[in-house]
Image (tube, coloured by chain):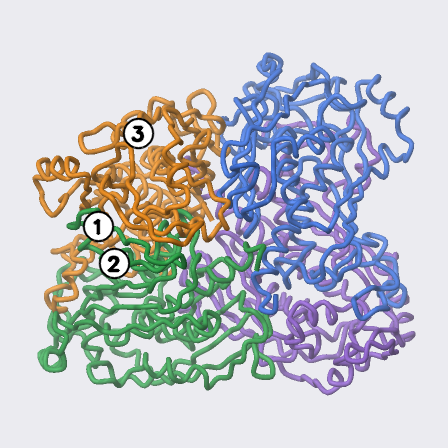
Chain colours: A purple, B blue, C green, D orange
Amino acid sequence: VNSWGRIFRISLWGESHGPAVGVLLDGCPAGLPLTADAFAADLSRRKSGLSGTSARQEGDRPLIKSGMFNDQTTGAPILIEFPNADVDSAPYEKIKDTPRPGHADWTAHEKFHGHNDYRGGGHFSGRLTVGLVAAGVIAKKIIQPARVQAQILEIGGQGEYQAALERAAAGGDSLGGIVECRVAQVPVGLGEPFFDAAESLIAHIVWAIPGIMGLEFGAGFASARMAGSEFNDELVEAAGKTATNHTGGCNGGITNGNELVFRVAIKPTASIARPQKTINLRTGAPEQIRIEGRHDACIALRMPVVLEAATAIVLADLLLLRRAMNHEQ
Amino acid sequence: VNSWGRIFRISLWGESHGPAVGVLLDGCPAGLPLTADAFAADLSRRKSGLSGTSARQEGDRPLIKSGMFNDQTTGAPILIEFPNADVDSAPYEKIKDTPRPGHADWTAHEKFHGHNDYRGGGHFSGRLTVGLVAAGVIAKKIIQPARVQAQILEIGGQGEYQAALERAAAGGDSLGGIVECRVAQVPVGLGEPFFDAAESLIAHIVWAIPGIMGLEFGAGFASARMAGSEFNDELVEAAGKTATNHTGGCNGGITNGNELVFRVAIKPTASIARPQKTINLRTGAPEQIRIEGRHDACIALRMPVVLEAATAIVLADLLLLRRAMNHEQ
Amino acid sequence: VNSWGRIFRISLWGESHGPAVGVLLDGCPAGLPLTADAFAADLSRRKSGLSGTSARQEGDRPLIKSGMFNDQTTGAPILIEFPNADVDSAPYEKIKDTPRPGHADWTAHEKFHGHNDYRGGGHFSGRLTVGLVAAGVIAKKIIQPARVQAQILEIGGQGEYQAALERAAAGGDSLGGIVECRVAQVPVGLGEPFFDAAESLIAHIVWAIPGIMGLEFGAGFASARMAGSEFNDELVEAAGKTATNHTGGCNGGITNGNELVFRVAIKPTASIARPQKTINLRTGAPEQIRIEGRHDACIALRMPVVLEAATAIVLADLLLLRRAMNHEQ
Amino acid sequence: VNSWGRIFRISLWGESHGPAVGVLLDGCPAGLPLTADAFAADLSRRKSGLSGTSARQEGDRPLIKSGMFNDQTTGAPILIEFPNADVDSAPYEKIKDTPRPGHADWTAHEKFHGHNDYRGGGHFSGRLTVGLVAAGVIAKKIIQPARVQAQILEIGGQGEYQAALERAAAGGDSLGGIVECRVAQVPVGLGEPFFDAAESLIAHIVWAIPGIMGLEFGAGFASARMAGSEFNDELVEAAGKTATNHTGGCNGGITNGNELVFRVAIKPTASIARPQKTINLRTGAPEQIRIEGRHDACIALRMPVVLEAATAIVLADLLLLRRAMNHEQ
């Protein structure tokens, strides 16, 4: 399904070259102050036009079609719509039968028996993350005073990556990267044993974002080479503070009040200008394709705000759930 | 919640030192041949007593309480119960107020306001994975001819790890490790765009297993340092075979028929014999604890069969869902 | 939540006097032929302007914003939007603090702490059923050759009700009614034991429709006065045909292939022109209100197509689920 | 699925003649006082042996296998098991190929391709409601001070029904009945617009109980013959009290604080001693069967406590959900 969440529940819809994309958000408490302007900052962080990202003018002004009244949430479902503009579908007609390497063209064609909207990746486009970012703006309000902040750690293996990006773009190539996300002031007790572990939910929603290849919490893969005596985070305060934070803020799937820390590995942009081999779906013959138009040289550049949104959405859902279960509150 | 899945749905229940642990499995098709013996092989792979694992005799003989008739599944919910035996709760009384570093003792105490069963980690114990393995035995039948196979890549950073394990155990310490899981003959078209991406579901269920610190598919974290021209898997057959498999078997969250490949990083066992610092929950004062009894020197050793189970469960659920959506079938 | 369904999943959104109302439909198989015109017949059956129904011109032309391509479903979520037009919110400002008897004004105000959109009933308006009808058009295609057909049995206690309706409308009053729904050629085996019994799901979704007061399957309330020897439907064909159909087409929550039959009782329209007593929310004092404008004299008149849609949606979901569970298929 | 609920979530499992039946209850807040004795009163109200009910000694002593510690709930899933005893499956072998009229024998056989456990109705047995009653005991604690109380209104059409029952039993026949359920002190604001309307959820869970034929809230079917001026409940207090209670305690699917009132129609017991016609599943030929053993002459007699449980479970789930959504609380 295209929905996620138990109480604070989001659904993404739309296609890259259809009339619009958007998000339906259910389970948002009533009375949150909210205007269309509140989305501007995060949407612009995600937007095209940054150095190294594509030139498409996405027209990311949200149309709020329901769930808002007098600049507040009403408690009813919130539908946010982003009309698609500046769309040129012509190049996709040419490559319709030649699935692009690294894209979902071939799997979507197989899964939907050729009925998928293939233009610009259709429903599989990174364009869909605009709805995630919009929902994240609302989630961030719900989880206050917790604050989510993500940043790029490296692009193409480097912390100072501007030159590498320009080289890749000039050469018709693309780069991957690593983004780190941290949440400060995260409340204690978010997450449920086993299947609704905080890490499970974050992992679930993070991997819904196109392009994610790896995820690690706290010490992550390095933990595999640590001894227990080195890894274990010793408790230093009754309120939960630990001397180290190798688990990245959770024990048993439940937040322990220390900073929540995770990193994701993002693959290089699939659309590159260089010629690539593929198979023609109609003829079955090998073919060489060249993807036209301008594309992000590195999708990791747009990721920080998308990961922040994903994280805030998970924490909002868990926070509402914890509120449900707390007698004492 | 302690449930996972949309059609093939599992729920884990029980505590380490309670009467029993087990699994409730709903949405299993009728008519699968199944006897209590079918569980023996996988349960014994998970079992205690291996070199480097704890001496607890877990008595992992499954009692099937429902959903089976004449050695076949009936289509009704399957309840599998594993009575707990060989349980000595005395050591836990001593450490009841001193949360063990690296365990969920403190978070469980906070989340459940002190009402959690703290003996042996209670509901947070790795013991609960026995139910996951049992459900996995059934899931593996459903996904045939697809075959899931997991193996240890390294323990404590080494492929030949026996000596390191013995050293750690002798020194009252523990080690982490990395396990790789591969699925051959995985059908094309499993997974849904965005929130039910195959990787999302695998990530969700994998992170429900205690001790997971990182997960990567295909080229994983290394992707972040690759160029697009290097990373993209070129299609070489109309049936979906690609020249390389850097994505690890999915595009757009949907299996592409190539081998499904992922790796997980597992932290060192939290219970170690060395003295550790913690805080006394009643007094608020710092305290030193020493965990008694024998414990696994490395929980990664038990992980391959647990990860196989988790993966098979996800694929079974997605396979049933794909069957629902296919007209042509 | 404002969502229903396990595989074929619908979400309703919008407010009566907001920019639009609509439905998000997830889990629809790819390749169903579908154009905006396909909705016209059912939408017009639901529409205003019939004798006895209100004069509001609802502009029920569906805008399909996603999930369609080349006049077929794509397998991606389908968003259908109905912009609101012909809306005059002025009368609602006057009665904002005086909840209308029989409406959700007071409960919505309490539940959402005064943040609900009160204009025209907001999210609680019968206007929302337009999305249900739209989803029903698609569901009816999925369940073919099964055919759902609902009809009015009585209005104000009478089978020939035109004069009664005119009398009620002239007197500023309203009438209730009973609608019967029948499904022919319903496949055997839809529904699951206990919580997903076919009747449970139909009851769930039927009671989501504003104005429902009672529901009975087959012999319904009359069963309570029958003896077992009279009630039991004897099997007369191995294919499941029974001599009588007192259960209304299900045994144990599972369709038995006989006609599915149920009836619903619908209350009289809440909005009436006569003066009514209420309490002023700001002052706490009793007050008399008079609801202006024209309103349906009988909402039961619009119900047949809404109930057909609800029923088709349930059967579509159960049909997809049965397909998932059938090996043999 | 055999699960119900969003936060307070129950799953029923087991077969009439298998090793046990029971319930898995997830999402129960920690710290509720609870002992095995707490179940005795409600379980005995449901039990066999009452005049007019069957002689099977069900041994309804609950075994609590998880989720309890020191006589309190822990917040972890609660598994309650009722071992089956006093079971004689021999009679069912004889009628294995001749589905009993009024039972789920034929539909279960078709749905599960003959793999269902047919003994005593298997998973479709009314025996399964013992788990519902057990979960209801816990739910009743959660919703306090709200109190659910159900009572028999009529059996075989009569309020004084003892003689009618004895006549039916003596004649090898059975009777239906009507039960009314009322909830006093129900909190305002339970239920969500549309698909989680309080009535929708009650209807859903009520129809999961074997034998339900009709359900009506408040004035119910009589509403269909009332005028709006007669039906509308006028508000007489700012706290929500209405002069009448024709809606039965909800507006727009949300509780309004007045008494919650509904009635259900229950069919006569399907198992009767008189000869009945059916079809032999192996030969396809008509056959006459006679059901042996003693059976309830009227299942409605056991229903009050089952309906109370179902209602309390719904209200508990909605109460926890409302708690999640209330900032101000």
Q: Quadrant of the C terminus of chain C?
A: bottom right
Q: Name which residue lies at 69% across and 77% down.
A: A118
Q: Name which residue lies at 40% across and 29% down.
A: D32
Give the side of residue A28 with respect to residue D289, left or right.
Answer: right
Q: Quadrant of the N terminus of chain C?
A: bottom left
Q: Looking at the picture, which amino acid does disc 1 mark?
A: Ala
- Chain of the residue under the numbered disc 2 shown in the image: C
Q: Are marks 1 and 2 on the same chain?
A: no
Instruction: Tell me the residue that label 3 is attached to.
Output: D43
Instruction: Tell me the residue that label 1 is attached to.
Output: D265
Instruction: Tell me the residue that label 2 is attached to.
Output: C216
Tell me how far mark 1 sits from mark 2, CA to CA: 8 Å
Picture quadrant where residue D13 is located: top left
Q: Are marks 1 and 2 in contact (CB under 8 Å)?
A: yes
Q: Position of residue D100 (x, y in %)?
A: 33, 46
Does residue A190 show up? no
Q: Name which residue lies at 32% across and 70% down.
A: C125
- Chain of the residue under the numbered disc 3 shown in the image: D
